[in-house]
Image (cartoon, grey):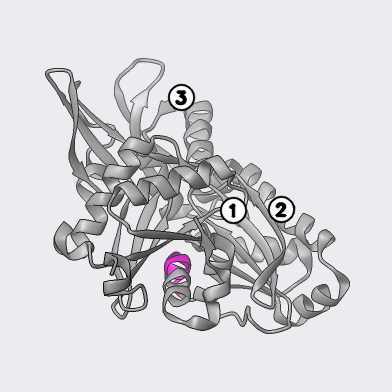
């Protein structure tokens, strides 16, 4: 009897939302057990590159490392950019949630979320990384389906549902019905692009160079998809003055951040409108009643629902616990036989 049959996929399983910004791990019968940044710190000694720390500790090092240490993110735009580092990161997270590699060897089934627009090569890289990290079987699930399941939408029913999952690297727009995807589109716009636009705007407008984490902090604190009346909220931003080269601080307003985010928000709105134009009429009629559901960390940007509602004329809601919807949905697909048909053999 093989090891796989001895332990059985039905009794052991892990679902992983391998995100560009955060990795979330769901364990069967336990729920979400880990949510950490998708960051790995590598230390080079005697010409050999080794993993120093992963996750929360590694993120604290970003932009602050000495010459022999490099803090990197092995995923870009929702897919693996550095398979060796991604493999080490996956192995670290799995070992952490299972309290040791030996226990994980009894966890035969791993489900990993992938963007609908990912290529076969990109999907193979994800599968190989998980397999090399110790998984005995690997299955994939499209992020939009996982997000819809995690948001509590009735995707198995003969009724159209639209979900917009705004992640760190990609935005997934999908129309779902009968446990499948009637239409999907993936645009490489998300939280990372928003951070880049904020950083570029501050550099251009205030002659101040700011780091990636500072730009993210600005987005989380005063970020807004729709410009407020007047200047709105204001916060101090610290960085390096490009004119004299000294550390400096400037005041940045909510209206300025909304202006900086106009392009990525506009691209997300355009993707939603394009999806509606391609939706079959019967499903479009259902969406009028059901509205649009937003998931993912990007959905937490203030007034994003308002921007999409204004452009489409439909009701738009942000899902409860939007950041965890994809991981929860993948976990439910792992646990509930109703959703087994949405899993893709890797």
Q: Are marks 1 and 2 in contact (CB under 8 Å)?
A: yes
Q: Secondary structure at mark 1?
A: strand
Residue at the spot x=54%, y=40% of the render? 121
Which residue corresponds to mark 1? 171
The location of residue 88, given as percent across then percent down, is: 27, 43
**Nearest to N terminus: mark 3 or mark 2:** 3
Which is closer to the viewer, label 3 or label 2? 2
Q: Are marks 3 and 1 in contact (CB under 8 Å)?
A: no
The location of residue 198, given as percent across then percent down, is: 50, 39
Estimate the spatial distance between the alpha carbons at disc 3 and disc 1, rounded to whole Å. Answer: 30 Å
Question: 302 or 206, which is in the foreground?
Answer: 302
Residue bounds of the magenta highlight: 321-327
**Nearest to N terminus: mark 3 or mark 1:** 1
Q: Is residue 261 visible?
A: yes
Which residue corresponds to mark 2? 271
The location of residue 58, given as percent across then percent down, is: 23, 43
Please name the predominant secondary structure of the magenta segment in the image: helix
Estimate the spatial distance between the alpha carbons at disc 3 and disc 2, rounded to whole Å. Answer: 33 Å
Which residue corresponds to mark 3? 207
């Amino acid at each position: 009897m093989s090891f796989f049959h001895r332990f059985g996929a039905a009794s052991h399983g892990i679902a992983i939302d391998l995100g560009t910004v955060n990795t979330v791990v769901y364990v069967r019968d336990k729920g979400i057990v880990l949510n950490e940044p998708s960051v790995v710190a590598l230390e080079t000694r005697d010409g050999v590159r080794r993993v120093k720390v992963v996750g929360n500790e590694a993120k604290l090092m970003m932009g602050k490392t000495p010459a022999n240490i490099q803090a990197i993110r092995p995923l870009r735009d929702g897919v693996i950019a550095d398979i060796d580092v991604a493999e080490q990161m996956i192995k670290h997270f799995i070992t952490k949630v299972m309290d040791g590699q030996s226990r994980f060897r009894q966890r035969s089934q791993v489900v990993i979320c992938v963007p609908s627009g990912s290529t076969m090569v990109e999907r193979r890289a994800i599968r190989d990384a998980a397999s090399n990290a110790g998984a005995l079987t690997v299955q994939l699930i499209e992020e939009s389906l996982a997000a819809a399941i995690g948001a509590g939408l009735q995707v198995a029913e003969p009724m159209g549902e639209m979900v917009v999952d705004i992640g760190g690297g990609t935005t997934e727009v999908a129309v779902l019905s009968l446990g499948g995807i009637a239409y999907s589109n993936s645009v490489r716009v998300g939280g990372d692009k928003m951070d880049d636009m904020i950083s570029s705007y501050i550099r251009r407008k205030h002659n101040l160079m700011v780091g990636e984490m500072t730009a993210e902090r600005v987005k989380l604190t005063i970020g807004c998809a729709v410009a407020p009346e007047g200047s709105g909220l204001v916060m101090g931003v610290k960085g390096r003055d490009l004119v004299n080269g000294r550390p400096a601080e400037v005041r940045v307003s909510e209206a300025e951040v909304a202006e900086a985010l106009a392009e990525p928000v506009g691209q997300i709105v355009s993707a939603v409108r394009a999806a509606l134009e391609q939706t079959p009429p019967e499903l479009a009629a259902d969406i009028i009643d059901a509205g649009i559901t937003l998931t993912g960390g990007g959905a937490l940007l203030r007034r994003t629902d308002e921007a999409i509602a204004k452009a489409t004329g439909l009701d738009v809601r942000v899902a409860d616990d939007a950041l965890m919807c994809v991981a929860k949905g993948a976990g439910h697909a792992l646990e509930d036989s109703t959703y087994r048909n949405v899993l893709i053999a890797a």
